[in-house]
Image (cartoon, rainbow, N blue to C red):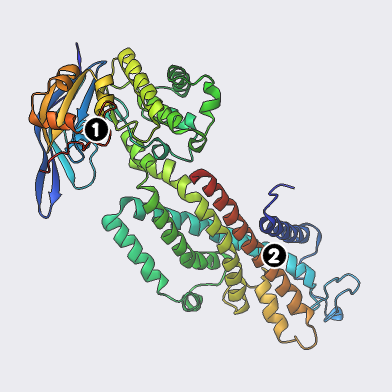
């Protein structure tokens, strides 16, 4: 098994792979979660044809979960990608150029961090049409901020190092130094943040969908089915518990991978600086 | 002897409040092709700023004026960097373990600059890098090219940094305290290699150092600097054996040598 000696990372990757497998299986093999069957509403788990039971409209919980996992993974990948690109670019420029550019960019970050995300989302939901794209853009709007701060800090340290001066003395342009030397130097810490943030993004996605501000049918979010099952919790616990468990496992996987990556990178840093 | 690099009316000023304070007085000197010129003096004498001004890269809040000639081309000291860095002039820094990008293999460190500036194709650069590493005493160049900086010893890293600086076959090579971070037995080896290669390539070397023993052994000529002025200049042996200026005499007297009387008080430099 690769990654020997990093049980956290191994465990996280295993959970993630299992969840992806469930999602893929649903995509390929299971019927659409939209199929209602009122004759079989509130079927308990282990019913024939419905291993995890059905909800009030007879929709299969397992179908719904596998669709939900797929949606959750898509949203968090998109958000992490957008916010990492924007945040790293802002952090690199602020840290490397300094002066007015740094001041402007970092005050923008401070200002944005002062806005409570939930208020922003609710206000935006009033104005904008809820959809996967708006959800992705909204969560990205608050997720790039930590990248900018972290990357700026690392850049401030790295730009003082001799190899940046050596690159300047070797005739490298500013863009060349930013992309060729500083970007690789900050990429490891940014990678850890990506993975840890994926967990938060999953929670935001399902949380907003739970509140009806995010993804709605015909797309299936874990948050939405939990919200639907809440009203019938006393008769059908499985409609809430299984999607909730799937969500918890996804977040756990993201956090374990993040922690594991940090350990892995930390060890490499110690080897290099020894 | 052809002149590789020369400075005329070269001065350096540092921003102080709203004005500029001159820290290197206008000075002129030449570095001939294939020779090593030692620039010696105390810390703060202006050695590093002078040589940095020569290649045009000064820290923020520091500016140079005057003119710099490299080969046949003359530049204004303020505009020299973009034209010459990485092409006609290169620099080897003091600490080899920090001056190499920790995430770049040796191959990229050597090849990147010249290919990016369009001086060589990738193939030519790789070939040239192998030849340089061979000259610098690496028996297995293919293996070295694949290594990361943390896998190199201090002496190896500095030789790689020298190879990187010599890749474009520059007219001027500035080496700033190149061996102070290295073990004593590696110093001599590294400086000998710099001298041999400079003569072969016709590169003029400006060696900044406060180690008079090393300067005496490796430099053809010496500039003695203090407080932003060149106080004495000449052929190394003349300057070190028959110093004319009182400052040079005091500098030589305060140097630690192996034949000094044990535990006797060393003459100290008077403050300015």
Q: Which residue is mark 1?
A: B210
User: Looking at the picture, how far across and down is residue B37, in whole percent?
Assistant: 22, 22
User: Looking at the picture, how far across and down is residue A143, in whole percent?
Assistant: 49, 65
Is A39 drawn above or below residue B152 in the view shown? below
- Res. B161 mark: none
Residue pictured at 80% horizontal, 87% vertical? A235
How far apart in space, not on screen, are marks 2 and 1 (Cα)?
A: 66 Å
Residue pictured at 64% horizontal, 67% vertical? A251
Q: Secondary structure at mark 1?
A: loop
Residue pictured at 24% horizontal, 44% vertical? B59
Q: Which residue is mark 2?
A: A69
Is A218 drawn above or below residue B135 in the view shown? below
User: Looking at the picture, how far across and down is residue B28, in whole percent?
Assistant: 11, 26
Q: Is residue B22 left or right of residue A63?
A: left
Mark 1 crowdedness (10 Å alpha carbons): few <14, some 14-19, many ≥20: many
Share a chain, discs 2 and 1? no
Asked if residue B9 shows in the view, the reply is: no
Asked if residue A40 shows in the view, the reply is: yes
Asked whether A235 or A215 is in front, the reply is A235
Q: Secondary structure at mark 2?
A: helix
The answer to which quarter of the image holds residue A220 is bottom right
Q: Quadrant of the C terminus of chain B?
A: top left
Asked whether B268 or B219 is in front, the reply is B268
């Amino acid at each position: 098994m690769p990654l020997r000696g990093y049980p956290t990372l191994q465990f996280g990757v295993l959970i993630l792979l299992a969840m992806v497998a469930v999602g893929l299986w649903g995509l390929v093999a299971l019927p659409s979660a939209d199929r209602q069957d009122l004759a079989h509403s509130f079927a308990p788990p282990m019913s024939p044809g419905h291993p995890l039971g059905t909800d009030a409209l007879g929709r299969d919980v397992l179908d719904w979960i596998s669709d939900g996992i797929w949606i959750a993974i898509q949203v968090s990948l998109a958000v992490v990608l957008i916010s990492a690109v924007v945040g790293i670019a802002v952090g690199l420029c602020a840290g490397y150029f300094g002066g007015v550019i740094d001041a402007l960019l970092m005050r923008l970050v401070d200002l944005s961090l002062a806005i409570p995300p939930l208020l922003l989302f609710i206000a935006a939901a009033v104005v904008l049409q809820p959809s996967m794209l708006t959800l992705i853009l909204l969560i990205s709007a608050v997720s790039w901020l930590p990248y900018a701060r972290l990357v700026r800090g690392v850049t401030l340290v790295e730009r003082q190092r001799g190899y940046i001066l050596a690159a300047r003395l070797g005739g490298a342009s500013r863009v060349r130094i930013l992309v060729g030397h500083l970007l690789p130097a900050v990429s490891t810490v940014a990678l850890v943040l990506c993975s840890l943030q994926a967990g938060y993004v999953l929670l935001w996605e399902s949380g907003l969908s739970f509140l009806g501000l995010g993804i709605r049918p015909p797309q299936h979010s874990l948050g939405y089915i939990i919200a639907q099952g809440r009203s019938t919790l006393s008769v059908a616990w499985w409609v809430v518990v299984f999607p909730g468990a799937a969500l918890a496992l996804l977040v756990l996987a993201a956090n374990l991978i993040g922690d594991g990556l940090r350990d892995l990178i930390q060890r490499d840093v110690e080897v290099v600086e020894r | 002897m052809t002149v590789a690099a020369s400075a005329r009316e070269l001065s350096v000023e540092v921003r102080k409040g709203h004005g500029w304070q001159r820290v290197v007085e206008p000075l002129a000197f030449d570095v001939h092709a294939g020779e090593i010129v030692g620039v010696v003096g105390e810390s703060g004498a202006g050695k590093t700023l002078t040589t940095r001004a020569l290649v045009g890269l000064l820290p923020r809040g520091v500016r140079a004026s005057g003119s710099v000639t490299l080969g046949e081309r003359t530049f204004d000291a303020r505009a020299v960097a973009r034209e010459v860095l990485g092409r006609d002039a290169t620099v080897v820094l003091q600490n080899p373990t920090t001056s190499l990008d920790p995430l770049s293999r040796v191959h990229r460190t050597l090849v990147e600059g010249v290919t990016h500036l369009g001086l060589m194709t990738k193939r030519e650069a790789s070939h040239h890098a192998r030849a340089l590493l061979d000259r610098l005493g690496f028996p297995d160049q293919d293996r070295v090219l694949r290594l990361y900086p943390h896998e190199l010893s201090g002496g190896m890293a500095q030789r790689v940094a020298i190879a990187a600086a010599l890749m474009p076959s520059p007219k001027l090579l500035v080496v700033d305290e190149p061996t102070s971070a290295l073990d004593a037995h590696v110093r001599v080896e590294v400086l000998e290699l710099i001298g041999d290669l400079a003569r072969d390539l016709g590169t003029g070397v400006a060696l900044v150092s406060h180690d008079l023993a090393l300067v005496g052994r490796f430099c053809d000529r010496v500039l003695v600097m203090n407080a932003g002025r060149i106080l004495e200049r000449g052929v190394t042996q003349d300057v070190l054996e028959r110093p004319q200026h009182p400052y040079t005499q005091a500098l030589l007297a305060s140097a630690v040598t192996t034949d000094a009387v044990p535990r006797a008080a060393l003459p100290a430099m008077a403050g300015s």
